[in-house]
Image (spheres, rainbow, N blue to C red):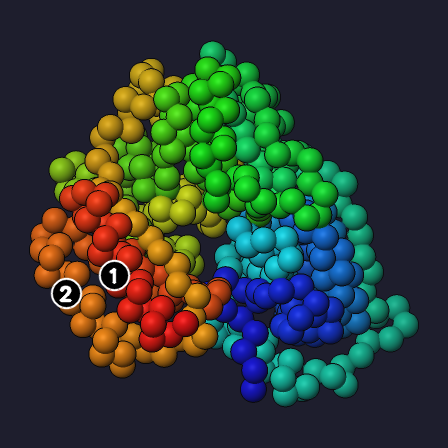
Amino acid sequence: MGKLFGTDGVRGVANIYPMTAEIAMQVGRAVAHYCKHHKYRHRIVIGKDTRLSGYMIENALVAGICSMGVDALLVGPMPTAGISFLTTDLKADAGMVISASHNPFQDNGIKIFNRDGFKLPDDVENEIEEMIFSKSIDALRPTAEEVGKAFRIDDARGRYLTFAKNTFPVEQNLEGLKIVLDCANGATYRIAPSIFEELGADVKVMNVNPDGKNINANCGALYPEYMARVVIEEKADVGLAFDGDGDRCIAADEKGNVISGDRILAVCTNTLKKENRLVNNTMVSTVMSNLGLSIFCKEAGIDHITTNVGDRYVLEEMLKKGSIIGGEDSGHVIFLEHHNTGDGLITALQLLASVKKENKPFSEICQLMKVYPQTIINVNVKSKPELNAEPEIMQAIREAEKELADQGRILVRYSGTQLLCRVMIEASTQEKADKLAAKVAGVVKNKLA
């Protein structure tokens, strides 16, 4: 049996297995069948980002869903978190997002939410794969009036905009703030400017002209340095950059310093702590978070829990520990009091709420967390053998750990979505981080590339 689902849905190069129209149709059929749990009409929400291949995958999913007697509700370009919200708001049985998130335009993917707006757990994804590869549902073919229909939901963007905007404190507004928004030519290109303008901000927009091929192309959360430059040019107070599907947010202060997810987590967690709203006094992040975040939590008296990389693992731990805030340095942040998945727009709104409450320059607010110099090198690999079974790599890791002692750390792990091995070093100086990362990455490349 093949494997379709990775760490965040199905993903790959569009029109090459597994991201073909044929597989998309089968995924649509299987999800539709899985959702048929009552006698009433069933419905699945479908949204997408701005990739050229989104049209192909969207139509294939619709064909599969309707062929099982389930209706498809089409909302067009919409942030991933928007589909999670709309699935529950429209009382649909599932939600599907056509996006490869931060990947380049030639890739695409399919993410699935259950009726409660949560991403599917592994066992359900396995069940869907089993339906597809076993062909157990091939003979199930409703006919006549039992075939599904497809509808466009014209007010979907307005619904989500109102929902996101209402997470901002009702007693506050953004008047007096000048903000640069980089929408990555992706799913936030229409909705993000509207939200911040309606809240009273002076907004300068970037990368809001998607052509199907320019999503994430030297813009957005993956390339925040461009947004940071515009912040300086425009004499703005804050810069905000989203990724292609809008579930990540990276910021910049008024001096043009890039503020990654860890510092956003620290600022927002600090606000919750000061306002006695930090439920269970707990914040969750991943093993990739900067050492400075752990030190901030220790000094602030906050319980800090780390998980494997991936927002789904952060969410699982948050639910287990009763935490309301968690996230990743990449800019995925989850505010469980507002939404049950990472949402770049809500992250931006909560960050700006903290900035307004502090009434200090953003750069000064961010000083509450020291960032340890960090170097990440991505090594292309041919396969992903267990690292523990590679003695030369393990020896290089041990040598780096010995040199770092208690003044840094090393993490070597595979990407969950690409044939990459990530080597991350944090050290007391950038020079040491660069040197050790290059040394370990060289060994990884020699053995696995």
Contact (Cβ within 8 Å) of mark 2 with mark 1: yes
Q: Amino acid at mark 1?
A: Lys
Specify whether 411 is left or right of 148: left
- Is residue 321 at least partly visible in the picture? no
Q: Earlier in the sequence, mark 2 or mark 1?
A: 2
Specify whether 85 is left or right of 50: left
Q: In the rendered picture of this protein, how many numbered marks are placed on residues?
A: 2
Cα distance, mark 2 to mark 1? 10 Å
Please name the residue shown 24% across and 28% down the image. 367
Residue 226 percent coordinates (x, y): 49, 33
Specify whether 8 is left or right of 54: left
Residue matched to label 1 = 439
**Secondary structure state at the residue bearing disc 2:** helix
Please name the residue shown 46% across and 68% down the image. 419
Give the quarter of the figure containing the C terminus. bottom left
Can you tell which of label 2 and label 1 is closer to the viewer?
1
Foreground residue, 102 or 381? Answer: 381
Q: Amino acid at mark 2?
A: Glu
Up-down relation of residue 38 to residue 2 (above or below): above
Residue matched to label 2 = 399
Please name the residue shown 54% across and 39% down the image. 219
Specify whether 354 is left or right of 166: left
**Secondary structure state at the residue bearing disc 1:** helix
Residue 431 percent coordinates (x, y): 22, 45
Give the quarter of the figure containing the N terminus. bottom right
